[in-house]
Structure formats: C-alpha cells, structure tokens
Amino acid sequence: MNWIQKKLQSFVDKAKQTFKRARPSKKDQADSMWVNCPSCNQMQLREDLKKNFNICKCNHHFDLDPKTRFSEMFFDDGEYELIECPEWADPDPLNFKIGETKFIDKYNNYKKKTGQQSAILAAKGTVNGLKIIAFGYNFAHGGAALTQREGEHLIAGIQEALNDKVDAVVSFYQSGGMAVTGNLNSLKNMPVQMMAMQMLKKAGIVTIGICGSKVTGGTFCNVYGNDFIFAENPKNENLLFAGKRVSASVNKGQELPRDFGQASSIVEHGMIDGAFESRIEIREKITDLIRVLLKKSEIEAKAESTSNVKVDIPAVS
C-alpha cells in the first residue's frame, strides 16, 4: 500500500468513527414513537400500530400482550375474571444463579414489568356468549419460559374449567419452552399438563391452541394436547421444537427450507389444523367452531355435563 492509499484509508477510518451511529438499545426502541416492520421494512407510528392490534399494513403480526388481547379483542365487553396463581408455587426451587445473578431476581423483575403473577395470564369470561377459560402466554415475561410456577398456574386454570364446566379452554401460545433454571421441576410440567388436557377432553370441554410467533421446546410439544391447533397468521415463525441452527446440525448441516418452522409450512405438512389470516378473525371463527362441536346455537343454554364426578388435578410439585 503506497502513501496515497494509506492517507485515503486513514481518512475513511476517521470518517467512519466520526459518523458512526450507535445501535439503539432495547429501551430506546421501546420508548421510540416509531416502529420498523421486519417484514416490509417500513416505519410507522407506534400509536397507529396499537390501534390495529399490533398488526402492520403488510399483515406482519407483532407480539400482543395477553391483557390487551383479552380486554380489547377476546372477551365480551372486555370483561373477565382473573384466575389466581397459587402463591406457594415456587418459580425457583433450585435457587438458581448465573455468576452473581440470581434467577429469582430476574423473575421478580419480569413480574414487575408485565404486572402478571406469572408468565401466563389465566382468565375466565364469556366470548360471544360461550363460557371460556383462556390462557395468554406473555413473551415479555422472560420469553414465557415455564417454571414450576407457570405449571401450577395452568393447573389452577384447568381445575377451574373442570369445576365450572365451561364450554372451552383456549390457549394463546408464545413461549420458549420449559425454563432450564428449574431442571426436572420445569420438565415435569409437560406430562402433568398433558394429563390435565385429557381430563378436559373426557369432560367434553373443547380445547383450542392458537400459536403466535416463537413457540418452541416443551411448549411446542404441549400444544399438541389440544383438540384443534391454529396459527395466528400464516407468517408466524419459529413454530418448532428446536431452533433452525440446531435442527440443521441434527440434519448433518443440510440447508433447511426458507419457510422451515413457518406457520404456512407446518399447515401444509399437516402439523396443525390451519392458520388465520389475522388475529382479528380469531374470536368469531373459534366461537363458530365451538358451537358446531358442542351442537349449540348462540342462544342455547349449556347442557349439563354427562359426568357428575368431581375431578381434582394433582399439583405439579
């Protein structure tokens, strides 16, 4: 490299440092008035996005927190009764630490941030006149990783569904799976939840799972305990047990299809029953489905359950 090239390179390096733009932090992005859509790459006002239930003009679905979903999109008149999480349910039975960071401190910060008792919001109310219990997984709560506490919260909601003989249980999934911090205490959520779902089926209660983006690990397995499974939108991604990188390595490094783990792909391969075009459709279409399954009209009262036996679900712990 001659002296001219060195001078030119030096000028370029200084210019890069001078005009270098710092990448905005997560807090900066959260506080910004503008949101960039990863699908169409267009900027739009956050307020406009909220008014459309976090759906971009290109139909990309951003995450939607359970409280907004339940009060503005799902339950009749936005009214519902919360199902409490058992206070004794411990999210950190192993007192897990990474270096000097305690998991329980992170977990308590998630609770403060979301205003929820656990990563799951469990609620009971009516939807188009049908009695429904709904579970909403909040990804902002530590990726909705399921600890022993989330397991007990789910069981409490399912027990309420059995006791009250509701028409259906609807779960809005968005979760990274079972929390590694809980070891077997988290993993045992899986079989207990599957047994609880079987109890709902025996009681004649319809179970429907709705998948948003990012449903992986043990949660993805538990989705298949539902009678019917739908994706919130055909573009929903990361609906798979393991991530793309891990799946590719298991497949001896072969390149995976571009739509691997995408809702449209898993519908095509028969892994789920279908995908809605938009989350706005969900309320009307699933209540129509439930009525058909229960052979009910909109004004019919719920028939008494054929089973009069009270069923108690054992605790996860």
Image (cartoon, grey):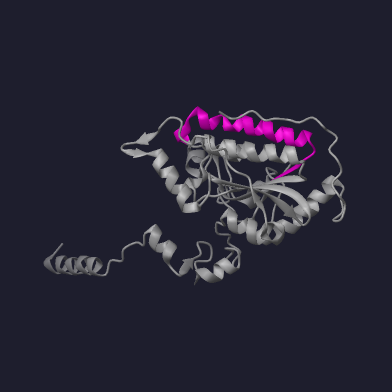
In this orientation, which residue lies closer to the viewer: 36 or 87? 87
Q: Which residues are magenta?
A: 180-209
Instruction: Residue at 48% x, 48% y: name it.
Output: 111
Quarter assignment of residue 7: bottom left
Q: Position of residue 6 (x, y in %)?
A: 15, 65
Point out the image quarter for the C terminus.
Answer: top right
Point out the image quarter for the N terminus.
Answer: bottom left
Please tell me whether residue 269 is drawn above or below residue 40 in the rendered image.
above
Q: Is residue 48 left or right of residue 18?
A: right
Q: Position of residue 120 (x, y in %)?
A: 57, 45
- The kind of secondary structure the magenta stretch mainly shows is helix
Instruction: Residue at 19% x, 66% y: name it.
Output: 9
Q: Is residue 145 left or right of residue 132?
A: left
Whether residue 277 is visible: no
Q: Position of residue 51 (x, y in %)?
A: 59, 69
Whether residue 38 is visible: yes
In this orientation, which residue lies closer to the viewer: 133 or 47? 133
Instruction: Residue at 51% x, 41% y: name it.
Output: 145
In this orientation, which residue lies closer to the viewer: 316 or 2? 316
Decide whether residue 126 is among the magenta residues.
Answer: no
